[in-house]
Amino acid sequence: MPGGARRRWLRRALAGAALAAAAAGPGASTALGQGGPLSPLPAPAPAPAPVQTATSTTPSNTTSDSGGLSSAAQIALYALGGVLLLGIGWVIVRDARRAVPDAGAPSAGAAGRKRRYDREKARARAKAARRQRRRNR
């Protein structure tokens, strides 16, 4: 997407979000039965009367399934999570290795010496230029 089209798309998205927020506005919370942030709290609902039920203790020999995942499904989920974490780690390491300078390039020490030499040379040129300007006054 070229830069101009991207900006137009972003403007349209922001305008749509602003329009949706304006449409919802302060009336949205009152439509749900809630007042504004500074309105008084509603009265609490009365507590229901307790109901007495007869409990009977009958032994249950049937095992009820808790509705959870089977052990095979749990193992598959854990394995999938592990693969996902390894994949994320691999992507991070790959990106970090791309950001490191080449091994064949000059070392940081050589680059630092070159920069220092360039700075000294620039200072010497500036000093010579100042001397020249003083002589030409």
Image (cartoon, rainbow, N blue to C red):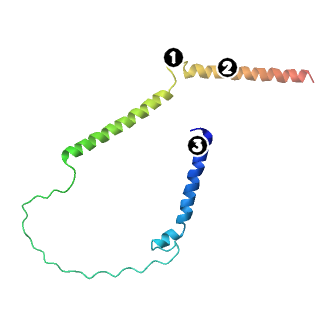
Q: Residues within 10 Å of mark 1 (few under 14, many from 20)?
A: few
The numbered disc on residue 6 is: 3
Pointer 3 or 2: first along the chain? 3
In the image as oriented, which residue stretches furthest toward the right?
A: 137
Question: x%, y% of residue 5?
Answer: 60, 42
The residue depicted at 27 percent of the width and 39 percent of the height is: 79
Inspect the image, locate mark 1, and give the three-letter code of the amino acid beneath it.
Answer: Gly
Question: Pointer 2: what residue?
Answer: 117
> What is the three-letter code of the residue carrying label 2?
Tyr
Q: Are marks 2 and 1 in contact (CB under 8 Å)?
A: no
Q: CA distance from mark 2 to mark 1?
A: 22 Å
Q: Which residue in the protein does label 1 denote? A: 104
| Left or right: 132 as drawn, with respect to 116 | right
Task: Identify which amino acid the numbered label 3 is placed on.
Answer: Arg
3 and 115: which one is in front?
3
Q: Quadrant of the N terminus?
A: top right
N-terminal-most mark, 2 or 1:
1
Q: Quadrant of the C terminus?
A: top right
Q: Nearer the viewer, mark 3 or mark 1?
A: 3
Circle 2 residues within 10 Å: few <14, some 14–19, many ≥20: few
Left or right of 121? Residue 100 is left
- Secondary structure, mark 1, is loop
For discs 2 and 1, the disc positioned in front in the rendered view = 1
Residue contact at pointers 3 and 1, CB within 8 angstroms: no
